[in-house]
Amino acid sequence: MRRPVSYPEPSYNDIKDKRFISLITAAEKTLQGSINLVGIPYDGAILGRKGSAQAPAAIRNALRFNSNYDAQLGLDLTDLHIADLGDIVLPDEVFSAHEQIRKEIIQLIKKDSLLLVLGGDNSLSLPLIQSYSEIFGNIGLIVLDSHFDLRDEINGKPTSGSSYNLAMKNLGYRLSPSRVVYIGLHGFLNSVEYAREARKKGITIFTEQDVKGYGATTLAKRAYDIASHDSNAVYLSIDMDSVDLSYVSGVSAPSPAGLTALELYDISFYLASRKKIFCVDIVETSPPLDPTSKSEIVAANLICYLSAGFKARLKLL
Ligand SMILES: [Mn+2]
């Protein structure tokens, strides 16, 4: 079941400056050829601190600060129509929550549009990736995260730290580790066992230093080439804890020395401009853990950059 959502009124009206939120309209069905948003306010499987269930509402609210044009990219979004499909309402129990996500999301992902999923905790990525593969078959996966998230179930249940491992196990060749790319790993935030497992599986790992070394856009291109090779579609999963603590402190597991906001945006803009990406999740933003609200502002701007990437894709086609 989905619940419709509302946006704040713009605080002023200027016909020469159409605010980003005025590009968005509520919809029940996916708007073809465009950007669609859906919220999943669920944090029932978080391993650390709760709070990401409040993210979809907070991120939508933070979008009121955004306008429609990026002077650096030279890209104008005024003719983009964005649909908001509302929030998927879920029970707290993780298996039934994930089952319901699979059922609902499969209706919303379309081949000529880009679905942006506002989480919610990182456990959501598992049913989302499974649905994605059900639609597209062989898929690639690009993950922006400070963590491997390669855990097994804990007490028999999936958690926010197990999505990518369980997705690869569950999908087999349809999500071969040779088409899985991690971006942004760094810091004392992981264990050597999971690092070994990632290498053994054949996952490609780009650290934060690699992003700095290659440059964000060049690195994003390499990641996309790997993930899209021999796949029908590429899924993009963005854990907001990949971003440096100074920009994003409202996450369950904050990470110093992470991606800068600009690196996040450059990578996301490039990837959203590629033709095989049809769904992106933005997970782990946790508004109650950040009294400054800057974390949801960073996430709201990410929606603008992903939208801009999609607009660039339409031009390229
Ligand atoms: Mn993480």
Image: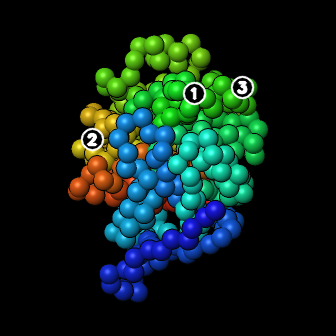
Q: Under 8 Å from ligand 1: the CB of mark 1?
A: no
User: Is residue 34 visible in the rendered structure shown here?
Assistant: yes
At horizontal 38% and vertical 67% (from top left) the residue drawn is 61
**Whole-percent x, y for residue 248 in the image:** 30, 46
Identity of the amino acid at label 1? Gly
Identity of the amino acid at label 2? Leu
Q: Is residue 204 above or below residue 26?
A: above
Identity of the amino acid at label 3? Gly
**Whole-percent x, y for residue 67 in the image:** 39, 71
Residue labelled with disc 1: 156
Packing grade of label 3 (10 A; few <14, some 14-19, many >=20) is few
Packing grade of label 2 (10 A; few <14, some 14-19, many >=20) is many
Foreground residue, 263 or 3?
A: 3
Q: Classify residue 287 as left or right of residue 229.
A: left
**Whole-percent x, y for residue 132 in the image:** 68, 44
Which SS class for mark 3?
A: helix
Mark closer to the chain start, 3 or 2: 3
- Viewer-side label of 2, 1: 1
Residue labelled with disc 2: 245
At horizontal 56% and vertical 71% (from top left) the residue drawn is 4
Whole-angstrom CA distance, mark 1 to mark 3, is: 20 Å
Foreground residue, 91 or 161?
A: 91
Q: Classify residue 78 as left or right of residue 108.
A: left
Which SS class for mark 1?
A: loop
Residue labelled with disc 3: 172
Whole-angstrom CA distance, mark 3 to mark 2, is: 35 Å
Do the CB atoms of the residues marked 1 and 3 lie less than 8 Å apart? no
At horizontal 56% and vertical 12% (from top left) the residue drawn is 200
Q: Classify residue 33 as left or right of residue 116.
A: right
Packing grade of label 1 (10 A; few <14, some 14-19, many >=20) is few
Q: Quadrant of residue 172?
A: top right
